[in-house]
Each structure stands twice: as C-alpha cells, then as structure tokens.
Amino acid sequence: MVTELPRKEVAIIGVGWSGGIIASELTKAGIEVVGLERGGERTVDDFIMQKDELRYAVRYDLMQDLSKETITFRNDRDMRSLPMRQMGSFLLGTDLGGAGVHWNGQCPRFLPYDFEIRSQTVDRYGEEKIPDDMTLQDWGISYDEMEEHFARFDETIGTSGEDNEMTAPRSTEFPTPPMKETPAIRLFKETASDFGLHPYHGASANLSEAYTNPDGQTIQQCQYCSFCERFGCDYQAKSDPIITVIPTAKETGNFELRTHANVRRISYDGERTDGVYFVDTRTGEEFFQPADIVILTAYVMNNTRLLLHSEIGTPYDPDTQTGVIGKNYCYQIMANAQGFFDRQFNLYAGAGALAGQVDDYNGDNFDHSDLDFIHGGTIQLTQTGIRPINTNPVPPGTKQWGSEFKQAKAQYFYRTLSLGSQGASMPYRYNFLDLDPTYTDNFGDPLLRMTYNFTEQDRNLAAHQTQRMAEIMEEMGANEVVANPDIGDYNIMPYQTTHNTGGVIMGGDSETSAVNNYLQMWDCENLFVVGASAFAHNSGYNPTPTVGALSYRAAEGIKDYYENPGPLA
Amino acid sequence: MTDENKQGQSNGISRREFLKNSGLVVGGVVGGGLLGGIFTQNFGGTADAPDTVDEETETDSPEQLTQARMFFKRQEDFDVLSAAVERIFPEDDAGPGAISLAIPYFIDKQLAGEYGFNSREYMEGPFYEGAPTQGPQTGLLRRGAFLYGIRMMQNIAENEYDESFFDLEPEVQDEILEQFEEGEVEMTGIMSDEFFQMFRMATLEGAYSDPVYGGNLNMDGWRQIQYPGSQMAYIDVIEEEEFVDMDPVSLHDHHE
C-alpha cells in the first residue's frame, strides 16, 4: 500500500548544500517546497560534544550507515566488483545538511579554464593533446556566466579570503578578510615566494570574523579548535547548510522538511515526472509525494543511482560511448610531500580551511606544451589541526609499533609538516558508474557500481606535483623529505578526499550530457539534477563553491521554469 | 617531558610482569575475580610509586569501577590481549604503556558494542577475496576476529614455546606479533596482517581516544605526545611562534 500525500509544487530529494540552497531560493519566491531527507533532523545542539576524534573521525558518526547502503567498486571491468564494506577513500554524509556539515570549508572557485577545458586545450595545444580515451568536454557554460552565482554563494557563507593573480577573477570583494597566519603557513608562503610562485591565504568557510549574510543568518568567528573535517562546528563558525540556507527556507513558512524519507524512485512517464516514491525508514511505510517539479540533490552517488533505478536518461555504455547516465565519473588526484623538522609547530591548533596555497601549477596557469598531462592542482600547506589517533607521522623505516614507534611519534608529532596537492581528475572512457548486478541495499535495490582507476594522465600529473612539493619542502628546511611520486592504483580504503564528481554531467548537447546548464534534465524537463554530479571533469580544487554556484544557477532556472514551463536551454 | 615520565611510572609494573612474577596464573588455578582483587591491591604498591598515590582512593576511583570485562569471557583471552597490546604500546621513557592506559579495557568495551558487531558496515554476502585495492572483504565480525587472533597468539606461544603468550619474554612476544604483521600466520576468513593492522589500530585508539571510552587513562596517552585534548579554542595560540604546551582537557570538561 502506497499512501499518496498532498501535491507540492516542488519536491527536493536530499537536503544538503544543493537542496538547502534551492529550497531557500524557491521558498523565498513563495514556492511551496517539501524537502525529503533520508537521514534525521540535525541542529547545532548536536555538536556540543563534538570534540571526539574516535566517534567522529574514526567511527564516522556523521556518515552514511553502510549496513543499509553502500557502493561496489572495481578498478576495471576485468575485476569482480565488491562492496565498499567500510568507509575509507571518501566519506559519504547523511542526515540534514549532508556532507555540507562535515566539510573542511575550503572555498576556491574553479578556473575559467575549467568550464571550457576542451576548447581551450585544443586552442592552445591542438586536438592531439587530448588522449583518445579522455572524454574531455566543455561544460556548456562559461565562467563569466557562472561568476554571479559564485558571488551569491560567497555572500551566503561569508567566505574569508584574499585575491590572487592565479585564481578566478571576482566581481565582488571577499565578504570577510583572510584567516590568521601560522608560523608553518608563513614558512611555506615565504619559501614559495622564493621560488617565484604566488602564494596566498586559501578561501575559507571557517570565518575570520562574525558575519551576517543577506538572508540574515549569522556565522560566528572561528576559534581554530581543529575539529572541522568529519565534525559539525560547535561554534557555528563553519558555514554549513543547517546554520544558513535551511533556516532561511524554514523562516519563509513555505518549506516542509520531512526527515527519514528515503526516496527509492522518481516517477517518470518517458517525458516528465509527477513525483517521487519514498519509504519512511522508521516504519517501512511507502509514500508517493506528487510534485510539479522534482529536484534531485542527493550527492554524486545517489543522483546517478536514482536516475538509473528510475530509468530516466540513457545509461552510459563505455563500449559504444553512447548514453550519459554514469558517464565521466571523476575524483581527485592527491599527492603530498612530508617534511621532518627540528622545531615544533603548534599543530594541534588549526581549522579545516586554514591554508597557504599556490595555484601556479593549477589549471592552465602554466605551460603544458612539454608536459605529458593537462591541468594541474593546488599546492597547499593546510593547518587543519592534527589529532592523535589518525596522525602518526614517523620517518620512513620506523617500526610501526612498539617503543620505537611510540618514541618517534612523541618526537615528530609536532615536527612534521605536509604539503598537499589536490590534483584535477580528467574523465576517462572506462571510469564510470552503473548498477551492480549482485549486491543490493536494505530495500533490495541494486547498489551503485563504481569502475575507476588512475590513468597515465593522473600518474603524470601526480608525479609533477609531488616533485614541485618536494623541492619546496626541502627549501623550507626539512631534515628529511618523504615524497612518493607513484600513486599506484586507486584504492578504496585509504582516505583521499570526498570530492567525487560526475555521473549526471552538464553540457550543451543532449547526446553527450545529461543536464543543460541550468541542471535541467534533457530527458525530463521538470527534473533538475544538482550537485557535483554535474561536473564534466573535476578541477584541482575543492568542489563545494562550484556546487553552490551551480545550485544558485539551478534555482534561477527553476524559478523561470515555474513561471514558464519548457526547456531552459 | 619529565612530569610525564613520572606519571608513566606511577603504576609501577606492567600487568604482564606482575602476573609473571606472581606465578598466579600458571595452571589457571586462580580465578579472575580473586586475581583481580589481588591485582588491584598491588597496583601502584611498588617502590617506584610516587607518594601521592593513595591505594584506598585508587581502588574506589570511578575508573576502577568501569574496569571489568564486558566482552571477553575468558580471563586467559584478556591476559593475552593485555600482554599483546603492551607490546604494541609498551611502557617506556616516552611514557605509560597500554596496560597503564587501560587499553585492554578500552578494546573490551569497543568489542562489546557497535565496533565489535561492525554495525554500520556492509556485511551482506556473497563474500569473495578481493584485490588489495578493494578494502576488507571478510564476513568475520571484529569481535570474532579479535578472539580468533588472540587465541592464535596463544596457540603459537604454546605450540612453539610451550608457554602462555603472557609468560613469554617481550622479545619473543614481538616475534609472534611480527608473524602476524607479515601475514605469515595461517588464518581462515581474515589475513593475519589484516588482523594485525586492526589490532594495532585498536591499540592506538585506546591510547589516544578521549578517556570517556575507558582508555587513555588520566589522559596520559595524550600527555606523552603533548596533545592538549579537546580545548575549546586556540585563537590565542594559533599565531604563536614558540611551542605552547598546555595541560590536556577532555570531553568531561565539555559536559555540564
């Protein structure tokens, strides 16, 4: 028995950054919205006891319950895909606010180059620069068209930062000044300057000072307590959806939030949707929520999976290179260099987005003519604040347990600095998402299957970044530098980054993309699929501001569609 | 670090040394309850103990009341566990070891709860041995894996050295642990190196997690790496050039 609920103008599936932004924009415009969140309610009162590394950083209290739903993974199609039984490489969020609650708060914008990457690469280096199986595409939009939406997101979250000649141009000032500078970050910046690079203070959603946004929501000043990534902020000093866009939506009176509502299907007649089917996870009761417009904002994995389950759009087939759903899954190519020093730094203190960084080796900011890869990545010294269970820096060759380890840890805990590069991830024909033939979730629905490995492009990019970082670290005065240029095969267990992208990509052509540049589905005009799933590749930056900007753009499009239904592009 | 070293010695001898010296466990004559009683009374009663330790107070302290076994049924399993974690995290110049930090009790409590049942992990079959890039694929729950691994340690000790694991010299205990670390011990359903990494990680969790979980007793795991725990704010420290050492605080201080 499916209970049919009263019709809503808009139903949103998943209430994190994207769902929250769209809910706030539509409800402010007087549109009736229901937000269907599979997890529970969450407020800042939930974070009073949050300074607990074991519970949050090691046992993943804020993350998805994998006993109910996970993905399966294989490096390539010759390998049997097996379930991701434990969380590791990336941390899928859940509950109100989604992964927007446990993020670090790093707020860079993607570069103009990113949105027109194929055209610009061909213009500058020729068609042959792009390997055969690299499914590189323009995004169907330019940075100039995106800029106002980036500015909106910055205003909402109060981004702290400073301009730099290597970053995307801005039409507005940063809402708040850069965060404080630590001795370790200063050392990195001074050294980077000596190399002729252009260091700057990273853009941050951990705010340098208290800020009230245009919606009237206040974000407090960061206390540098070190509990950001994997944690909710007990100070309300890290912008997240539950202290910004979600209360804004609620205050309009037009937003109904329905938690424990796990959407299993989007109803689809081959042209349009008329609502969604969900299960109340507390009772198992099934509901149909009729809606004029449906917004899918359930992160990369479930945006892709729900479309496949609902048979909306054509699944991607890597053999024929036709279809779009599941195409261009990308990640990020992480590289690092570790340095061991004589002196101690106050590394227990920090914030998730407290970073010195250079973008001289990011995007197309440097000449790739003689390089065997395109794009690049940030190079950052991020002082997130170290915590003792997960931070065990000891020089190579040190035994990993016993007295030798224990003494080395005491020696090096505050004497180790790391440089990290978040490298761009280019799409590849055989890296994709589809449905697993064997494993299911707790409803019996097939899990999403990820087929992914690093490519030559990725390995070459990582080796380049590692080399640059090792040189800088050496010059910073480290006694010993550890930098492994070989990233090997992609491994689903060691934490790398929660910057998964693609699967429902945007573009200017319905043959090669799933959504237009308002994130409206080509194959279902009253369904909008919003999030990093829309990225046609992943840049060498954190994705959240681009997700935020796309969400604001989608909200504009949805408001237009609400007035004048039809294709927006 | 001087203060910490003193604290590191405050419990005098390790549980393993005590058991060995006392000879009480040989043949399993003494029951756990009685042994526990004797152990508690002798705890801190050595010549090295600082004057400030009051035996009466220590016996009645809240920490002691939470120290009993919730998961491990057999005393022998717990004694092997204790001896093994002490080798992973031994008492030394850097500070107290696993037994002084109550890490065996921490692990026991963890195994009794959702960690031991892998409650929030995908545990549906079919189970296949995966590629190294695919992460753990065992269907064995952690509580089963720990019992299995610990009993394998004891088996090796008895078969190869004719003694209980906890009666062996530290160097010999290390050799057995290294067999696990190298993946040389034959186990079914889990590789011994996989078990070892889990065992090592659980030990470090017991050393460095908030004392609310029963390990890191008196925050001495934190003290030996100068970790200040869960301070509310570092806004006054963040720009400091010199290292700022401070007394740790724990979740207890955040709790009304």
Image (cartoon, rainbow, N blue to C red):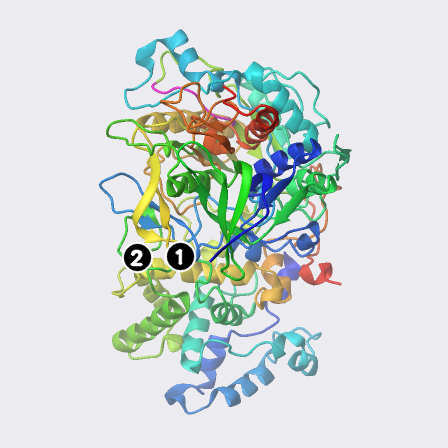
SS assignment at label 2: loop
Discs 1 and 2 lie in a common subunit: yes
Mark closest to the chain's N terminus, 1 or 2? 1
Task: Answer above or below: position of A524 versus A253.
Answer: above
Q: Is residue A342 visible?
A: no
| Quarter-of-image position of residue B143 | bottom left
Left or right: B52 as drawn, with respect to B120? right
Magenta stretch: includes residue A377: yes
Q: As shown in the figure, which amino acid type bears the numbered disc 2?
A: Glu
Residue at label 1?
A: B122
- Chain letter of mark 1 equals B
- Chain letter of mark 2 equals B
State the residue lying farthest toward the left.
A78
Q: As shown in the figure, which amino acid type bears the numbered disc 1?
A: Tyr
Residue at image point 41% right, 74% down: B80
In the image, the segment drawn in magenta is A372-378
State the residue lying farthest toward the bottom.
B29
Residue at label 2?
A: B182
Q: Is residue A301 visible?
A: yes
Task: Answer above or below: position of A533 versus B105.
Answer: above
| Quarter-of-image position of residue A353 | top right
